[in-house]
Image (spheres, helix red, strand yellow):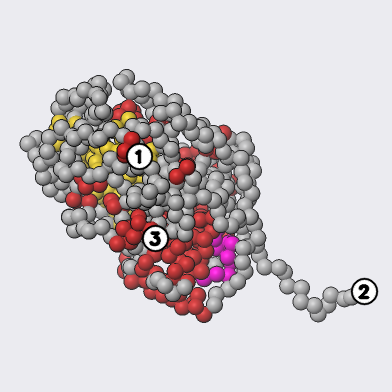
Amino acid sequence: MVSSKGLNLSPPPKQYGVTKPISMSGPMDADIQRSRELEKFLSDQGLYESKEEAAKREEVLGRIGQIVKDWVKQLTRLRGYTDQMIEDANAVIFTFGSYRLGVHGPGADIDTLCVGPSYINREEDFFFVLHNILSEMEEVTELQPVPDAHVPVMKFKFDGISIDLLYASISLLVVPDDLDISDVSVLYDVDEPTVRSLNGCRVADQILKLVPNVEHFRTTLRCLKLWAKRRGVYSNVTGFLGGVNWALLVARVCQLYPNAIPSMLVSRFFRVYTQWRWPNPVMLCPIEEDELGFSVWDPRKNPRDRTHHMPIITPAYPCMNSSYNVSTSTLRVMMEQFEYGNKVCEEIELSKAQWGTLFEPYFFFESYKNYLQVDIVAADIDDLRSWKGWVESRLRQLTLMIERDTFGKLQCHPYPHEYVDISKPCAHCAFFMGLQRKQGEIIQEGQQFDIRGTVDEFRHSINMYMFWKPGMEIYVSHVRRKQIPSYVFPDGYRRPRHPRVQSQQQSDKPCCEDGGACRIGSGERCLKRKKDPDAVDVKNDMPEKRRSISPQRRDSISPEIISHKFGGTSPCLAFAEGSETCEVDTKRFCPDDVEGGCTSNSSVITFLSSEVGSCKDIGNESVAGSVCRLENVCGDGNGVCQDGLREELEVKPNAAVGMLLKSVGGVEAEAVQKPVLSRLSLTSTA
């Protein structure tokens, strides 16, 4: 018998995550050098706050902590509790999000959670009493309660520091200062909104426990957040990914490459997620059973979970999908951007590119021929803040509605940035969506996308805002690329098209003939040139495009719109060949001759036709009455199709496929009820 005495029986290294690592390799000298360059780049971009600002944040958190303690004691006294209860009454402040993870930058908001006793409620005590206390403090500005959000929140600035304050009432009469927020006992006898409020802190703590190296995780996450913002895919509310989503994706890559340093992790991030087979879920740990009766993410039991396109599961009980907002269109956009990131990182590793190339901004207004412009108007800045928050939170519903009503043939790219025309007298801002026909779709000659009913339905849902005030208006208009208002450009004027966009459109256009899909940068390009004798010139089989009879546009930085009262019959906004023209009342957004801004709740949308070659910009043609044709090629600008994966990761498939998208919102009297779409099997009857 061989004795084990003296043998090296050190325990095996800890496994992070639900699967074994892809690689245990550490960095080489070149990786270390690239990491230094990356960290210097992030520092030069101003991503790290100063010591003075860090100290101010700590001071503000301390003051808010004292405010909520006094608030709880005040309510305890008013409700007739004993002197001892009043003395013991307490509330505790926790942080979560980027601040808790240690990746916040200068000027970033602080996500905070106030945990109070069971007799202090959210509806009256938090959103009414505490709201009034804060509103009377001179340090507090821009106070905005959002009680009907998925996670109810009160937003404000305290001494210039942006705060998002949540409230959770737990089943304790006295909240101890050393409360362990990670203990599952805090979830006893609480409602769903409270669980969601508590889980922000619980998830942040779990993430930090489940990554092999916290500092490497933080540097990589800072990098990916900056990249996502530059590429226009950082926004949970519009259907992309928010801070916690990016943190979970980065944490999973850290688990798969436990010995990698930031430069390696950034490269592996794009390599992994360009090959990830969605809707396979990203998980940092196994999903705990529902021991307290709360619903957890499980597509085998929950039909709604089967409709999720990009599941990213939170690691704290009850485990939920943090990216339920992602739609087919926004997932497509993110996959295109992952491809871009992967391509650039490969060039960086070959010393053919620098880190700055990875963070080049996405040229959204050069990438599509057709856009929706959503103008939001209010009587003053304070009203605009709340009105804009409501509209922005519903924009992803417009994306879903368009996908539903066009059977997925018209794709949307909502851009998560707001724009302001400072020349207009009224308080307003604008959001934009890129539109293009689904890549690889075979269409019939003259097929059009009439989404006027969709816009009316969206407008109807927007006007259900319970805090609506006079002056709060929304306008939706269809604009072509050359009609994009100049105020969206950084210098106030349209610059020449970026060489990278031009070269990408010329050399990297994916081929989608015969309904096939392909990858960006593919060596085999089957998109035929116009001069190819074997190519089919579809325009020859179509009637010549009619010249528009719309009036000439005046020089204006805002598009012309057709204005009509909400609830009325939709006017004819476009005409097709052989149809009669319609006379409509045309008004300009926020007209200069109307003092105080716009007065009617209006929208305009045109037919979008999928005929080939007729989406060329036509001089100063008015948006009103125009018929815009979507080009019959796969992709527009940076459009990308994928034909599969280069490699398959060891991820078990899940059954979350083929479920129906549910109808969203109500339908106005004049709108036609559209059929519900299958998520995978899209019919061609439009």
Percent position of residue 520, x then y? 44, 56
Contact between marks 2 and 1 (CB within 8 A): the answer is: no
Quadrant in which residue 596 is drawn: top left
Pick out the residue farthest to the left: 593
Q: Is residue 184 above or below residue 257?
A: above
Q: State how far apart marks 1 and 3 are (Cα).
A: 39 Å
Pick out the residue farthest to the right: 1
Mark 2 or 1, closer to the camera: 1
Q: Which residue is the site of mark 1?
A: 538
Mark 1 or 3, closer to the camera: 1
Element assignment for label 1: helix
Percent position of residue 451, x then y? 33, 31
Element assignment for label 2: loop
Tell me, yes or no, whether the highlighted magenta stretch contains residue 592.
Answer: no
- The tag on residue 227 is 3
Percent position of residue 389, x then y? 31, 42
Mark 3 or 2, closer to the camera: 3
Q: Is residue 391 left or right of residue 339?
A: left
**Residue drawn 55% across the image and 54% down it:** 645
Residue 509 makes an appearance in the image: yes
The type of residue carrying mark 2 is Met
- Please rate how many residues cluster around mark 1, counting C-alpha atoms within 10 Å: few if below 14, some from 14 to 19, many from 20: few
Q: Is residue 234 left or right of residue 518?
A: left
Q: Which residues are magenta?
A: 251-262
Q: State how far apart marks 3 and 2 are (Cα).
A: 59 Å
Tell me, yes or no, whether the highlighted magenta stretch contains residue 259.
Answer: yes
Image quadrant in which the C terminus is located: top left
Q: Which residue is the site of mark 2?
A: 1
Q: Is residue 599 above or below residue 203?
A: above
The type of residue carrying mark 1 is Val
Q: Earlier in the sequence, mark 1 or mark 3?
A: 3
> Residue 576 or 681: which is nearer the viewer?
576
